[in-house]
Image (cartoon, coloured by chain):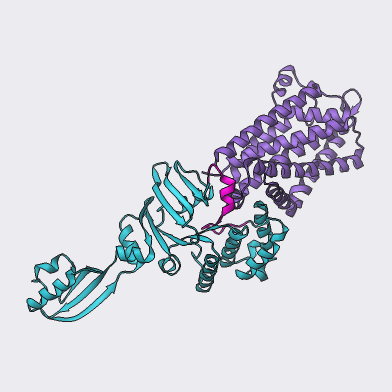
Chain colours: A cyan, B purple
Amino acid sequence: MPVAVSIKQLHKQFGDLTALNGIDLEINEGEIFGLLGPNGAGKSTLISIMAGLCRADSGQVTIMGRDVVKQATASRRMLGVVPQELLFDPFFKVREVLEIQAGYFGVDQKNRAWIDELLESLGLADKANSNMRALSGGMKRRVLIAQALVHKPRVLVLDEPTAGVDVDLRQSLWSFVERLHNDGTTVLLTTHYLEEAEALCERIGIMNHGELVALDSRAGLMKRYSHYQLKLRLKGATESLPSVVGEALQRREADSIWLQVADDDQHLDAILTALKLADIQILSLHTHEQTLEDLFLELTAGKAA
Amino acid sequence: MNLRGCWILFRKEVRRFTVVAMQTLLAPVISALLYLVIFSHVMADRVTMYDDLSYSSFLVPGLIMMSIIQNSFGNTSSSLVFSKVTGSITFVLLGPLSHFEFFIAFVAAAMLRALLVALAIFVAADLYIGVTVAQPIYVLVFGLLAAATLATVGFLAGVWADKFDHAATFQNFVIMPLSFLSGVFYSIHSLPDLWQTISRFNPLFYMIDGFRYGFFGQSDVAPGLSVVVMCGALAILGIIALMMLRSGYKLRT
């Protein structure tokens, strides 16, 4: 599959802080890629370098084959970025903002139909002649998305687009992203909402402390790191358990034990057999499957800034 | 070349100052006219310049040039600082504009503001005391060169400044004193020798002196020298600005 975004050995240092430490990543054309990570993991720095807003110390980034440093203007034509902060220019109205942004990309008046479509699709049609200052936070977020799309970029970067927006807007943004995806746009999404990544993204990368600590398809990631917790309520004390249980034992309570078992682990059968042979009766059994959130916390536990 | 991108950025910058025209166009015109009314009233009968030139007439080109200097500087510096502080500069930086296109659009918009202010003062002064122009081409050349040079200085200050206070410091402690000490209100021949020598190191002096030559055909130094000094200053400052943009200084961290 053709590569839309290629990132090779990317390093960035801010004083003593290592923001990016040798990131290697490829995002395929047409996919929705989710980039997760705690605050300070380096996601926004990575996006800034892709957009040419920040210079890497070393490494290379290309957008649709264009180097972001050596072919800066060409690579920017391929990219639309929705920044995390609610940035706006208070001098202008919504339609003016979009026309100006289109103009930077050399797009002429013929673009008016596309601007109308964006206004309509993002629920901004009745705000087209409102000044940016008069818009609510959610509306400003929609304008940011429209600005990023006004030149029909091949790659769209959404840096936490649903942070602080209401459920309605979140749902409509998700639909809009899916529509873009169906039209062939490559989407890079960073988010703190893990259900968002689970719902939208085909592949997911997890960053922590400037490094990519996990990278796989959504299903592959869950499978690779997947295990579930098993709570067994036992009849009688839980002090003396067969030794085979020990490896999986996570927590012990008065009448229950918590085990962590891999998805395809043959160990479970041995545990249950050992308990039966030891004449320990299982009164009840509860399972808790690992979610992306559990995985995220596990991979970034104790390391978040 | 992304000519349309450059044109749109220029238009956006023009729109930015026309939206607040009371502050950016009318206020500097009123200030300059107040200077003219007060100084011409107080000094008219006491001082003549260049043999038989009235002080009021002498003052007009100086005031126009001072307005060009302050408004061209103020437009680029304030626009850049505002965009940086609000973060809206990001939208321009995300666009496929080259360093040169980015620079030209900001400088050209600042020049337009300065020249609109200058034209308004000229017209008002002509109505008030009558203004004669001996060498229109020099008026135009010095007006354009001064606006371009100070717009470039404002551009440098705007890129450098992290907050409004930085730009205001530059304006109040560098531009304002240099413009007042450059011969806006006097000819440097009226100064002691030491101050005459010091004035010749003030690049703004050449702007005002050359501009005045355009009005009266007389100046403190040869207008050719002033053109050379200004072209040199503009070229050096322009190269520094483009180098700053190329390096990403304070804009692309």
In the rendered image, the vertical position of residue A114 relative to residue B238, given as above or below = below
Q: Pinpoint residue A204: horizontal percent, then vertical percent.
A: 40, 61
Relative height, residue B251 to residue A272 (above, below):
above
Check the image and name the residue furthest to the top: B193
**Is B48 or B157 nearer to us in this picture?**
B157
Give percent across and percent down for residue B167. 62, 41
> Quick check: can you spot residue B177?
yes
> Where residue B146 sits in the image (x, y, percent)?
75, 34
- Badge count: 0
Does the magenta segment cover residue A300? Answer: no
Nearer to us in this view, B196 or A1: A1
Horizontal relation, residue A275 to residue B140: left or right: left
Residue at image point 68% right, 30% down: B235
Would residue A283 be found to the left or right of residue A145 on screen? left
User: Any magenta on residue A83?
Assistant: yes
Q: Is residue B55 visible?
A: no
Query: Left or right of B67: which side holds B173?
Result: left
Q: Is residue B39 left or right of residue B76?
A: right
Given residues A236 and B184, the one toward you in this image is: A236
* Residue furthest out toward the bottom: A283
| Image quadrant in which the N terminus of chain B is located | top right
Task: Judge by depth and name the residue closer to the eye, B221 or B195.
Answer: B221
Residue under the image location 74 percent in, 20 percent down: B196
Residue stretch in magenta: A67-88
Residue farthest toward the front in the current orientation of the protein: A1
The residue positioned 29% from the left and 63% from the top of the image is A225
Q: Position of residue B174 (x, y in %)?
A: 65, 34
